[in-house]
Amino acid sequence: MLLNSYFLLLFSIVLTINDMLTLIIQLTTAINHGNNNNMEEILKWLIEIEGIAERVYAKAAIHFSNDIEFAGFLKHLRGDEELHHIIISRAAEIINSRGGFPPLAIDLDIDIQKNIKDHLLIVEKRIEANSIGKEDMMEFIVFSEFSEWNDIFLYIIEALAKVIK
């Protein structure tokens, strides 16, 4: 029952945040249209971030193991991140084997990359130090699941799907 509440909370937040992030991606795409960004670098960053997120959720599931329902939720999120990691890694391998990476119509700011990675690492350290509560973990989940990197992940997968066809 409580697990359903977590999903409802995340779903209600995603509508507003997802609309804002979609607009940001569209604006960035319009501004940077034709810009020959380095997809290989962005893919490497996404692979790293998905791996860190998977690791954080795995550690969090252990940390919250006394709360069976919440730990199960965290294990589910870990599985999602594992799948994302596999997908983006495999996509990078395919594109690399076909002779290179296509240009992107987005520009991934170094500050965005750093902020997302730093946030993940801070939460990981708090889990390891046993200094994170359930409420803070929920805030982290909302941050990570609705941050820019998930929209970038979807954009990259869509761009790669067009190239792979």
Image (spheres, rainbow, N blue to C red):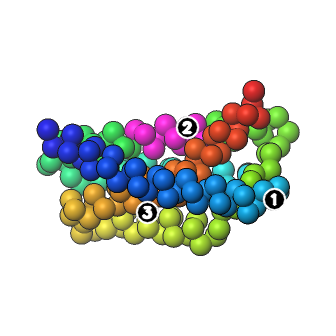
Q: Which residue range is magenta in the image?
A: 79-88
Q: Residue at x 58, y 44 (%)?
A: 154
Residue 42 % position (x, y): 67, 55
Residue kind at label 1, given as amino acid type = Asn
Q: In terms of secondary structure, where does tag 2 sit? A: helix
- Neighbour tally class for label 3: few under 14, some 14-19, many 20 plus, Cα within 10 Å: many
How far separated are the C-alphas under marks 2 and 3? 19 Å
Q: Does the magenta stretch mainly form a helix, a strand or a loop?
A: helix
Q: Which residue does the numbered mark 3 point to in the structure image? A: 120
Question: Do callouts 2 and 1 mark residues in contact (Cβ within 8 Å)?
Answer: no
Whether residue 83 appears in magenta in the rendering, the answer is yes
Q: Residue at x 41, y 55 (%)?
A: 16
First-in-chain label (2 vs 1)? 1
Left or right: residue 115 compared with residue 16: right
Residue 159 % position (x, y): 70, 41
Residue kind at label 3, given as amino acid type = Leu
Q: Nearer the viewer, mark 3 or mark 1?
A: 1
Does residue 158 appear in the picture of this structure? yes
**Quadrant of the rendered image containing residue 123:** bottom left
Q: Nearer the viewer, mark 2 or mark 1?
A: 1
Q: In terms of secondary structure, where does tag 1 sit? A: loop
Q: Residue at x 61, y 56 (%)?
A: 25
Q: Which residue does the numbered mark 1 point to in the structure image? A: 35
Residue kind at label 2, given as amino acid type = Ile
How far separated are the C-alphas under marks 3 and 1? 29 Å
Q: Residue furthest right?
A: 99
**Quadrant of the rendered image containing residue 107:** bottom right
Residue 162 % position (x, y): 73, 34
Left or right: residue 65 compared with residue 11: left
Residue 14 % position (x, y): 39, 50
Q: Quadrant of the N terminus?
A: top left
Q: Which residue does the numbered mark 2 point to in the structure image? A: 86
